[in-house]
Image: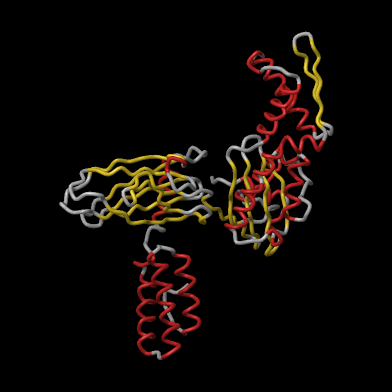
Amino acid sequence: MRLINEPTAAAIAYGLHTRQNTRSLIFDLGGGTFDVTVLEYAFPVIEVRASAGDNYLGGEDFTRLLLEDALKRWQLDPLQISRNALSALYNQLESAKCSGQLPLSCAWQHQERLLEISWHEDELEALWLPLLNRLRAPIEQALRDSLLAPEQIDSLVLVGGASQHTLAQRIAVRLFGKMPYKNYDPSTIVALGAATQAACRLRHEDIEEVILTDVCPYTLGVEICSQNVDGIFSPIIERNTTVPVSKVETYSTLHPEQSKIDINIYQGESHKVKNNILVDSLTIELVQTGTIQSLDVRFSYDINGLLEVDVIFPDSGQRISKVINRSPLQLSQSQIEASRTRLEALKICPRDMLINRTFKAQLEEKWSRALSDERQWIGRIIIEFENALRENDAQAADKIRREACDTLHIVLHDNP
C-alpha cells in the first residue's frame, strides 16, 4: 500500500507518463484548495519536479463572493436571514456556478419575494478578480522551484470541479499559451488514475509498470533562537525535496547549565514559526556536561507522510527518536516499522560513506601532483565536494563524484 498524489493520478489517467522527456503542469482547483504540480516523464518514471499551492483558495471562495454580491444587490442583511435560508441560497449559487452557463443566473424564494439575479462574464471577472489573481502565485512558484519557464511545459491538465469554469481556465491559457486537456471529467480524473495505478501495483497484464517519485510539498524544520531572537524557523527538509529523504542539521544549547531542550517541529515557508504550522513537539532532559552542547537533529521523511525525528548529542551519546505519523493511510505498526527500516538506510551521512572518503583522498592526492590551472580546477572540485558533504546533500555529492571520476579517470570500486 502507498499513497499517490492527485496530480500524478491525473497524469496517469491521460496516459501522459507514456511519453518520453515531456513535462506537464497539473492545475488542481478544488472546492477548498488550489494546488499546482510540475511533472516530468521519462517512461516508466514519473517524477514530481515541484508542488505549490494555496490552502485557502478554492471553488467555495468563488461561491462565497457570489453570495455576498447577491445579498448586497438585493439590499439584504445576512444577519437578519436564518442560517438555513443562507445555506439554501449558497447551494443554489453553487449549482448555478457549476453548470458553467453564462450568464450565471439564480432565483431565490425569500419569504414572500422571488429574488432573481444574473452575472454576465465581464461582471464575474470583475467580482472574482482578486481570487483569479491569486491563482498566479502558486503557478509561478512551482515553475521557479522546478527551474522551468512556461514555454517549457508541454501539456496542461485540469483537475477539480472549480477548474471547469471558463475564467479559471483562461488564466492558465494566458500563462502557458496552450489549451488544457479536457477529455475527462476533472472531478473524477483522479479516481481514474488511482485505479490505473492500483492495477499497476497488482501487476495487471494490461497495465505497464510505472515508477513514481514524489516530493515533500512543504518545508519541514524546527524553531530556534538566532541572535537572541526567538521564534525563528530553521529548515531541515526544504520543500520539493524528492522523498524518501533524510537530512540532518546541527544546533547547540543556549547555556552550559541548561537542563532541558524543546524541539518544536513546524511546516511552512515563513521565516517566523508563528506563521507556520506546528506539527509536533518533544522535550528532552539533557545530560549535564557543564558546557554548551551540540546536537544533530535529523528528519527522515517517506513517501507515505511518515516523519521520523532523531535528536543526537555527539558529546554525551544521548539519542532520542520520535515517529510522527500523519499519513492518511492509517498505517499499521508493522507498516510503520517497515517504513522506518527503509528510512534507516538513508541515515548514513554522505561524509561517513567509504566511497566518499576514498574519493576525497584521491582528489587530494591528484591535487598534490597537479600544477597551475589543473591544480586550481581540482581545488574547486574539492571545495564543491566538501560543501556538498557539509550540507549532507548526497545527490550533489554523487553527481560531483561521478563527473570527476569520468574526467580525472579515478576508479572507485564502490562507484555505481
Q: Residue at x 22, y 49 (%)?
A: 255
Asked whether 15 or 70 is in front, the reply is 70
Q: Residue at x 50, y 83 (%)?
A: 407
User: Quadrant of the image for the N terminus?
Assistant: top right
Asked whether 92 or 275 is in front, the reply is 275
Asked whether 68 or 401 is in front, the reply is 68
In this orientation, does residue 195 appear? Answer: no
Q: Residue at x 75, y 52 (%)?
A: 174
Give above or below for 32 relative to 39. above
Residue 123: percent from left, percent from top: 79, 35
Displayed quadrant of residue 168: top right
Q: Image check: 151 left or right of 222?
A: right
Residue 28: percent from left, percent from top: 66, 44
Residue 115: percent from left, percent from top: 80, 17
Q: Residue at x 46, y 84 (%)?
A: 408
Residue 89: percent from left, percent from top: 72, 20
Q: Residue furthest top?
A: 112
In this orientation, does residue 260 appear? Answer: yes
The chosen color scheme is secondary structure
Displayed quadrant of residue 273: top left
